[in-house]
Amino acid sequence: MRMEISSSSCKIHKSKNSYQKNIDLAKISFIVKSKFRKTTKRRFLGYVWLVLDPFIISMIYLFVFSVVKANPSASSILLGVTLYRVFQASIIGGTRCLNNLNGGFKAERVSTKIVILSELAYRVIDVFLQTVLIFTILVLAFGMGFFDGLIFLVIAQLMGLLFFGFGVSISPLLQKIPDFQNVISYGLRLGFYVSPAMYPMERMEGFHYHFNQFNPFAYFAELSRHLAGIDSVFFDLDLRLFIAFLSCLLIVTFIGFRRVDSLRWRMTTWS
C-alpha cells in the first residue's frame, strides 16, 4: 500500500491482492455493524424494532384516520407512510454523512471508497428492513402481486439511494450554514402532511394537487400505489417530469459521492 499526499488531496494506492480485498471487506463489515449498533442503541430487540417501526407508525395513522372518519385505504397508508420514512431517513442520513468521515476508525485512515461502500451497504440494509414487513403484509393481506411487491422493494431501494445521494450533496452547505438544518427538518415534517404519504393524490384537488405534481416523492408513492391496485394518478402525471427528476437526482448523487474525498481532506484529521 502506498499513500500519495499532495496539497489538495490524499490518495491511497493499493495492490489488488486477495489479502487486501479481505481487509477492505472486513472494514466495510465493521462500519456497517457499527452504524447498526448506534441505530439499535445495543438493545436486544433493536433489529426487530427496525422492522416493526414502520408498521407500528402506519397502524397509528390508520387508527387516527379511522377515528376522524376519513375512511382511508389501509394499504394506501402502509405504502405512503413507509415510503416517506425511507425518503426522510435517506435525506437525513445523507446530510449527516460528513459527521463521521472515517467510519468510526480512530487509529487508521480508511479510504474514501470503503467509507462510501459502507454508507451504501448500510442504506440498502436499512431500507430493506423498513420495507420487508410492509411488502409481506401487502402481498398476503391485500392481494398485491408478488412481482409487483418486489418492484415496490426496488422502488424503495432506488428512492433511498437517490435521496441519500441528494443529502450527501447538500451536506457541505448544512455544515457551512447550520440554520439550513432546521429548514430541512421542518420541511420534511411539513412534507409528510403535504405530500401523498397518508392519502393518495387521487383525493387531492386544486393547488394541493398541482403542487405535488412537482414533488419527486409523489411519483414514487403513486407508482407504488398503482402496483398495489390502489387508486393512483401516476399515469395522469407528467412522466417526462419524473424522468427529469430521476436524471437530476442521479447527477446530484454522482457529484455528491465524487466530492466526498475532497471534503474528507478539508474537514478531518484523518484525510
Image (cartoon, rainbow, N blue to C red):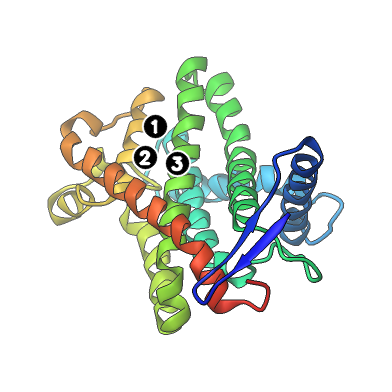
- Classify residue 208 as left or right of residue 254: left
Residue 220 sits in quarter: top left
Where's residue 100, x and y in %? 64, 69
Above-or-below relation of 173 to 128: below
Q: Looking at the rendered structure, which numbered label has been put on residue 161?
A: none
- Classify residue 170 as left or right of residue 266: left
Where's residue 205, x and y in %? 16, 48
Mark 2 → mark 1, Cα distance in angstroms = 5 Å
Q: Are the residues flagged by discs 3 and 2 in contact, CB closer than 8 Å? A: no
The local secondary structure at tag 2 comes to: helix
Q: Looking at the rendered structure, which numbered label has been put on residue 221?
A: 2
Which of discs 3 and 1 lies nearer the camera? The answer is 1
Mark 3 → mark 1, Cα distance in angstroms = 11 Å
Q: Which residue is identified by label 1?
A: 224
Which amino acid type is marked by label 1? Ser
Q: Quadrant of the C terminus?
A: bottom right
Q: Quadrant of the N terminus?
A: bottom right
Which amino acid type is marked by label 2? Ala
Question: Residue sitting at 32 percent across and 52 percent down?
Answer: 195
Q: Are the residues flagged by discs 3 and 1 in contact, CB closer than 8 Å? A: no
Q: Are the residues flagged by discs 2 and 1 in contact, CB closer than 8 Å? A: yes
The local secondary structure at tag 1 comes to: helix
Q: Nearer the viewer, residue 229 or 12?
A: 12
Task: State which tag comes first along the sequence, 3 or 2.
Answer: 3
- Residue 196 visible in the current orientation: no
Task: State which tag comes first along the sequence, 3 or 1.
Answer: 3
Question: Residue sitting at 82 percent across and 49 percent down?
Answer: 45
Q: Which residue is identified by label 3?
A: 77
